[in-house]
Image (spheres, grey):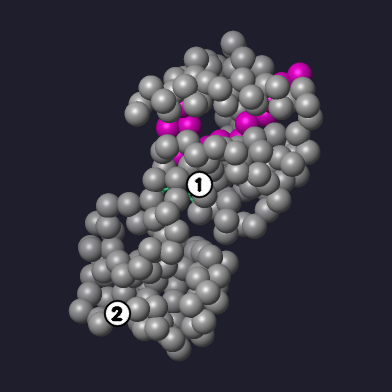
Amino acid sequence: MKLKLAIQKSGRLHDDSIKLLKECGIDISNGVNKLKAEASNFPLEVFFLRDDDIPQYVEDAVADIGFVGENVVYEKKKQVAVVEKLGFGKCRLSIAVKRGEEYESAAFLAGKRIATSYPVLVAQFLQEKKIAAEIHEISGSVEIAPGIGLADAICDLVSSGSTLFMNGLTETEIILQSQAVLIKSESISPEQQVLLDKLLFRIQAVKKAKN
Ligand code: ATP
Ligand code: ZN
């Protein structure tokens, strides 16, 4: 029996996901198959997927566990358990407006158009603040929306802030602090849980060594 792990196929979380496995002493064979790989020294099978699809695969128990950003986990609202923060992929989901706009509080957003790839999280934020605004879902290059007159504000992932800066925007409010987490299926078997506990023990040791 093997534990099936879903990680990002390529992108910001891929390299750090592989690196964490290495630091846990787990060697992944770079087989010809780009969909999955097997560990040579741990009962682990690794699936390479788009990050957006990882919560669904784990909810469906096609993968037992996954490494994915909290932003994706909470946006997708799937039935999965968040087990451990992994310490990489750190970023924040923030509101940004054109530089020079007077943004004193979220009340600024009332009646405005907000462009985002995170409609669920933005709607939650607006509801908590009791603000009515229009959410425009766009899948990429959200930061150009205000400049082309498509939106008054955006809500997007930020790490250094340089993308916002280059587009004449300024970050005004953080709605979620995010990092990569380990999620698990709610239907994991007791045998797989034993394997997961072994993996978690190693992950925690790696994290401790870094502190
Ligand atoms: P995929 O092809 O897998 O769908 P993607 O383009 O959606 O990839 P990436 O840009 O590779 O995703 O980002 C993956 C994750 O990395 C994000 O969901 C987030 O958790 C994290 N991340 C960390 N810093 C940033 C940042 N500055 N911008 C975007 N994502 C970041
Ligand atoms: Zn994605």
Residue range in magenta is 1-20
Identified at 39% across, 55% down, the residue is 92
Q: For the residue carrying disc 2, how many other residues have a C-alpha within 10 Å: few (<14), some (14-19), or many (20+)?
A: some
Q: Tell me the SS state at disc 2.
A: loop
Q: Quadrant of residue 39?
A: top right
- Image x and y of residue 73, in percent: 58, 51
Q: Can you name the residue that lies furthest to the left here?
A: 100
- Given residues 144 and 42, the one toward you in this image is 42
> Does 80 sit left or right of 27 as displayed?
right
Q: Which mark is residue 103?
A: 2
* Residue 60 showing in the rendered view: yes
Residue 199's place in the image compared with 25, above or below, is below
- Residue 11 in sight in this render: no
Confirm or reject: label 1 Cβ below 8 Å from ligand 1.
yes
Q: Residue at x 62, y 57 (%)?
A: 76
Q: Is residue 93 magenta?
A: no
Q: CA distance from mark 1 to mark 2?
A: 28 Å
**Is residue 190 rendered to the left or right of residue 118?**
right
Residue 14 or residue 2, whichever sits in front: 2
The C terminus is located in which quarter?
Answer: top left
Give the image location of residue 36, x and y in percent.
Answer: 62, 28
How dense is the environment of label 1, judged by Cα within 10 Å: few (below 14), some, or many (20 and up)? many
Q: Quadrant of residue 87?
A: top left
Q: Secondary structure at mark 1?
A: strand
Q: Amino acid at mark 2?
A: Tyr
Q: Which residue occupies 62% across, 15% down?
A: 42
Q: Residue at x 71, y 27 (%)?
A: 193
Residue 181 % position (x, y): 52, 41
Check if residue 6 falls in the magenta segment.
yes
Residue hosting label 1: 69
**Residue type at mark 1?**
Gly
User: 51 or 74, which lies in front?
Assistant: 74
